[in-house]
Image (cartoon, grey):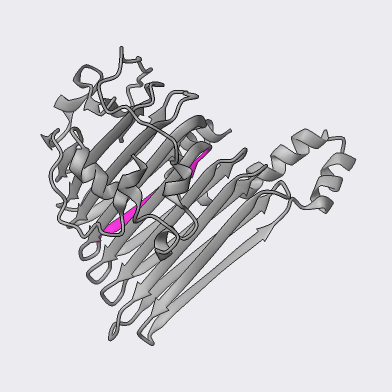
Amino acid sequence: MAEEFNIATKQFENWKYTDLARLLAGISFNETEAGSQPQIAKTDDHYYVVFYAGSLITELSDIDALPVISSAPNKLTLDLQNHPLAKSAQQKAKAGINLKISKSLKKPIHLVYLLSAENLASHYQHQIEISNNSTATIIEETIGTTQKAELINSSMQIEIKSGELWHVQHQARAAGVKRFNFIHANLAKDSELNCFHSALGADLERYDLIANLNAQGASCSSHGLYSIKAKQHCDNHILFNHNASHTQSKQNFRGIIDEQAHAVFNGKAKIIKDIGQIKAEQFNHNLLLSSQAEVDTKPELEIYSDDVACSHGATIGELDKNAMFYLQSRGIPAEKARDMLLHAFVHEPLEPLPKAMRNWVQKRID
């Protein structure tokens, strides 16, 4: 399967630190149907859309309660030359969800990807449209455990004509999983997109977010955290294109990297000529818990206009020894003191989330 990803080599800037040919070398994925599907525990406060082995599982999904146009993937009208995984999803996806949301939803739409533990490659493609000043929350979550190599590859195209969307992704700890996420969004006048992404230990994960702020008043934010160890690899790539005056964006990611893990962050805001009243921020902060842990971080601004208020920054450090000493001097055991400092470090990206959503994420990262 790695031959499909020859473009994703270090000669391409977007893939400089994530060499798929090397990371997927020797791995063979099965693209036939898996065995019996697992079950999930559902709650009444979410609308569920459940996928397994590349298919939509209708009996576990709340399709009838949603404004579903189609459960078959549509072709995306995007240039995917430098996005080989999204291109593969477009070519191979047999399932996805096509939603047109024209009135606010009281409950989040929860897309669940169930792991099969059978060396399976599953591809999904989704399209979301928000209009009529509607508000909605969409969650994507990978559930299950596997020690085998399993690939889950999803792409999503978002059109916000008017309204607000929260998009939350959560990747739980699951050794062996290769998880690829591609999101492309267009924002119209006064529309708002807020994203949160947590990666807690897939074997290999890539998060691509491209958002075009195309009209006055458009706003986009992306917050996230990652915690990886062993030889896990996590790559976050965010690009916000400011194509109109009076637009704003923010990126804020924090990471904990242990043992021989490798994290990548590339967050960029591009501001075209002859526009003004732009605000853009990119921040990335990392803690290295091992001398062999590695992080490559590059928050950047590409500015072709003068009337802007922009800032960016990155830090790479270790746990504060003075803080550890202080907590231990108050009778707190070293391991608990360490956990307290790590929880405090990753808390900031959670703060913008709505309270119910923040509690949902917090339970999964504790």
Residue for point 47% across, 23% down: 145
Q: Quadrant of residue 271?
A: bottom left
Chief SS of the magenta region: strand
Q: In which quarter of the image is residue 56?
A: top left
Of residues 269 and 178, which is closer to you in this image?
178
**Residue 106 visible within the image:** no
Quarter of the rendering occupied by the N terminus:
top left
Left/right of residue 175 with respect to residue 303 in the rendered view: right
Of residues 366 and 182, which is closer to you in this image?
182
Q: Where is residue 207 in the image (x, y as percent from the top left)?
A: 40, 49
Seen from this angle, which residue lies furthest left?
A: 69
Q: Position of residue 19 (x, y in %)?
A: 46, 52
Q: Position of residue 321 (x, y in %)?
A: 82, 51
Quarter of the rendering occupied by the C terminus:
top right
Q: Where is residue 25 in the image (x, y as percent from the top left)?
A: 45, 41
Residue 207 vertical position relative to residue 38 in the rendered view, above or below = below
Residue 347 among magenta residues: no
Residue for point 17% across, 43% down: 103
Residue for point 42% across, 48% down: 21
Seen from this angle, which residue lies furthest top?
A: 36
Please report the bounds of the magenta region as a residue range: 191-200
Seen from this angle, which residue lies furthest right?
A: 329
Left/right of residue 343 with respect to residue 338 in the rendered view: left
Of residues 104 and 286, which is closer to you in this image?
286
Of residues 237 and 216, which is closer to you in this image?
237
